[in-house]
Amino acid sequence: MQINKVCCFGAGYVGGPTMAVMASKCPKQTFVVYDINEQQIEKWNNKQYPVYEKNLDEYINQTLNTNLIFTCDIDIALKDCDIAFLAVNTPSKKYGLGAESSLDISYIDSCLQQIKKYPLTKRLILVEKSTVPIKTCDYINAVLRDKNICVLSNPEFLAEGTAIQDLLNPDRVIIGGAIESAQQLASLYEQWVPKEKIIFTNIYSAELSKIVANSFLAQRVSSINSISIICDKIGADVNEISQCVGSDSRIGNKFLKTSVGFGGSCLKKDLLCLIYLCESLQLDEVAQYWRQVYLLNEFQKQRFYNLIITSMFNTLRNKIIVILGVAFKANTNDTRESASLMIIQKLQEEQAILRIYDPQGKIDKLEQCQSLDGIFKGASAIVILTEWEEFTKIDYAQAYEEMAKPSYCFDGRNLLQGEVMKSLGFLYYGLGRI
Ligand code: UDX
Ligand code: UDX
Ligand code: ADP
């Protein structure tokens, strides 16, 4: 079967950029991105993207209304369609059984209901793109058992801030499911991804690989954070440990930066989904192993705000504290599950006066400074929560002059040179280093 037309349910963070890159790399196919939210579709059509990603504009400009269409019309999406991606949101379930840990697939479910109603004229390959709980493929097959469909799992691994780069040059493309359909989907990727990077698996392996990958990333951050705690006690330097350990090629040097705790919409959600899976399979020891990765992350956040409060002699009331960064990592405006949320809340409970600045990130209902101008005047402490490059270029000697004394700096990303900060007069605290 020749693939001519592809559609995608969900014009969000995953669907929009993924289809834009695919459309540019597969000029012979037509890509239709469908969403129930009219405003979302309008934004894409007017190039006011609902997500911020470097170079996204270039790919939309190349393809929009040529072989890439954004629409709210299900007929335009599904008519004569060969492949349909499911890229709708699957947040942590907020209610009932598995609340706060299982994934909520009700948006996937609503897509299935729409497909069920639609009179398909040919066989449709249905592709799970969003992270889904294991065996969602069985559920899809059950709901659409009267339809001429084949389900595949093709999880997305793009990270925020590097989405376009990750799509253009993925480490791997995983396609799980019946091989004939899997090869048809692969024929799209083969137009720009080297063949050896495309891995064919069974469908459950593909589904599981996504939550395992994110859980492993979370585990690495918790592992190095646990070592930062030991370093604090014994005077070793965690950055040096990362370098020493990471240069073992069996371990690798990525994801070994200690931090105030991992955030973002995926790592915690997928880790909790894995824990829930273990629990539902009654694998208590395995569940506990992974739960500890989650608990360590919570502990790292607590440890950091306790460090701030206790170092300042438990008297933050009416003291000015400058918060640098609210985004869950640099180069994104996203603050979901950011460590900054908990830390800001705890400092507010101490009745400190917060001056908060982030070049892109914005927390709902929270007053933030628009720039760094005058932000340090009279402040008692600087708290760094996101590793924006801009924060390395601040004139800290000048900041120190303007601040109240003693002047503290709590660096939750080990972004600055501790020795330099101390020589300026700061009481400087990093993570896992003296
Ligand atoms: C280890 C370290 O690798 C080495 O750097 C250090 O100097 C000494 O300790 P070794 O004990 O010889 O070396 O064995 P290693 O190859 O690390 O394997 C340890 C165990 O892990 C073995 O039982 C091996 O079968 C097991 N293993 C290793 C797995 O089960 N899975 C793997 O993927 C790798
Ligand atoms: C993640 C996965 O990387 C991506 O493959 C998947 O598709 C979606 O989830 P993302 O949530 O965008 O991507 O962010 P990521 O770069 O993984 O960072 C997650 C968190 O870990 C951030 O808060 C980051 O600051 C933190 N982190 C990362 C560390 O604290 N130390 C590190 O060494 C790396
Ligand atoms: P992700 O990060 O997984 O891409 P987003 O929340 O950014 O998640 O985007 C998901 C998109 O899916 C939203 O724009 C939402 O309106 C859309 N959506 C939800 N349910 C459906 C549905 N049944 N059909 C089409 N689109 C849907």
Image (cartoon, grey):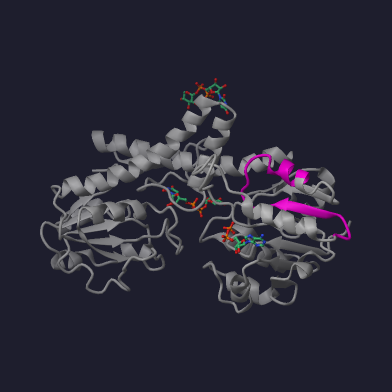
Residue 192 screen position, x and y as percent: 72, 59
Question: Looking at this rendering, what residue extends furthest in the front direction?
Answer: 96
Where's the C terminus, which quadrant? top left
Quarter of the image that includes the N terminus: bottom right
Residue 431 visible: no
Give the left or right position of residue 30, taking residue 136 as reference. right
Q: Is residue 381 above or below residue 261?
A: below
| Viewer-closest of 242 and 5 | 5
Q: Is 33 situated left or right of 282 in this image?
A: right
* Residue 1 seen in the current view: yes
* Outermost residue toward the left in this view: 405
**Looking at the picture, how far across and down is residue 109, in whole percent?**
68, 52
Ligand 3 resides in the quarter of the picture at: bottom right
In the picture shown, does residue 99 fall above or below 411?
A: above
Please state which of residues 159 and 397 is positioned toward the viewer in this rendering.
159
Magenta range: 120-142
Residue at image location 43% in from the left, 51% down from the top: 263
Rendering coords of residue 180 (x, y %):
85, 46
Q: Position of residue 75 (x, y in %)?
A: 78, 68
Is residue 137 rendered magenta in the image?
Answer: yes
Q: Residue at x 65, y 57 (%)?
A: 87
Q: Is residue 370 above or below residue 143?
A: below
Q: Is residue 8 magenta?
A: no
